[in-house]
Amino acid sequence: MDNHILLIDCPDRKGLVHTITGAVSSHGLNIVETDEFVSADGFFFMRIECTGTTDTLSLEDELRRDLPAGTNIRLNPKKHKDIVVFATKEHHCLGDLLIRYAFDELNANILAVVSNYNDLQPLVSKFGIPFHFISHEGRSREEHEQAILRALEIYRPEALVLAKYMRILSPEFVAHYPNHIVNIHHSFLPAFIGANPYKQAFERGVKIIGATAHIVNNNLDEGPIIYQGVVRTDHRHSAKEMAVAGREVERDVLAQALKLVFQDRVFIHRNKTIIF
């Protein structure tokens, strides 16, 4: 028996739940979980988990016919996502993902790791995962990103994960994976955007530090937020101690965000997320 996840967002109107669940049922599928939400600006969001075998194209056609203009429909098989992880030199987020993958706790298949440095190759090799060292040195950003895209053609991933990848991706690169790149940022956005956030936090005397996982778009560290976490600090903590505590938060926040994304629980609406 097949497992499916149906994701729908559209302008709100009366009877949408009845229309959608009726169509799913009439196509021989059994609904096992459902969530819905209507935003303040009048958009309807629904996530359905269902089981059974059906003609998925026929179901999608019926839903498009009966739902409002502008409806977005995704009917995905419930399965592990195929991903490629990007990293630079810091190991903590990548190492955590590799361990979760090794014990089947990630709900994803890590097809490869891409890095602009070779530092993490020994770590990745322990897990039997291909490692692509693609240096940015001596290359323009366009040349570097084209080299990465050529490597990704081998794998055709469904999503990219930036696990402390310390390079800014161009709009041209992001356009290849719209709303399918997840980044972990080492601060509680929107505060302390850019480099050296813990130094910024230390100088400001903050009482909490944190991390933010978000979808990558064309605005630096301003994409839709998926998950955030914080830890308390005080005047006794140095910038270095803050960074150590921050790495713990970063690992947890990225893992929690990816859990939501890989289970198809995240809708993007304007520059926000709706999460079931």
Image (cartoon, rainbow, N blue to C red):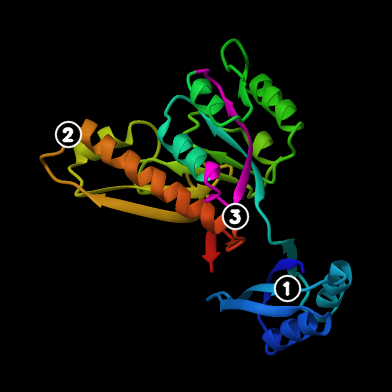
Residue 220 visible in the snapshot: no
Q: Earlier in the sequence, mark 2 or mark 1?
A: 1
Residue depicted at x 71% and y 27%? 151
Residue depicted at x 63% and y 50%? 179
- Asked if the residues shown at circle 2 and circle 1 are in contact, with their CB atoms under 8 angstroms apart, the answer is no
CA separation, marks 2 and 1? 53 Å
- Asked if the residues shown at circle 1 and circle 3 are in contact, with their CB atoms under 8 angstroms apart, the answer is no
Q: How many marks?
A: 3
- Asked if the residues shown at circle 3 and circle 2 are in contact, with their CB atoms under 8 angstroms apart, the answer is no
Nearer the camera: disc 2 or disc 1: 1
213 drawn magenta: no
**Magenta stretch in the rendered image:** 101-118
What residue sits right under mark 2 in the picture?
238
**Disc 3 residue crowd, few under 14, some 14–19, many 20+, Cα 10 Å:** many
Kindly identify the amino acid type of the residue bearing the numbered disc 1: Thr
Q: Which mark is residue 251?
A: none
CA separation, marks 1 and 3? 18 Å
- Secondary element under disc 2, as helix, strand or loop, is loop
List x then y, in percent, for residue 148.
Answer: 67, 26
What residue sits right under mark 3 in the picture?
262
**Disc 1 residue crowd, few under 14, some 14–19, many 20+, Cα 10 Å:** some
- Secondary element under disc 1, as helix, strand or loop, is strand
Residue 171 in which image quadrant: top right
Image-based side of 237 in relation to 201, left or right: left
Q: Earlier in the sequence, mark 1 or mark 3?
A: 1
Image-based side of 26 in relation to 242, left or right: right
The quadrant of the image that shows the C terminus is: bottom right
Kindly identify the amino acid type of the residue bearing the numbered disc 3: Phe
What residue sits right under mark 1 in the picture?
51
Front residue (pair 196, 107): 107
Image-based side of 207 in relation to 32, left or right: left
CA separation, marks 3 and 2? 36 Å
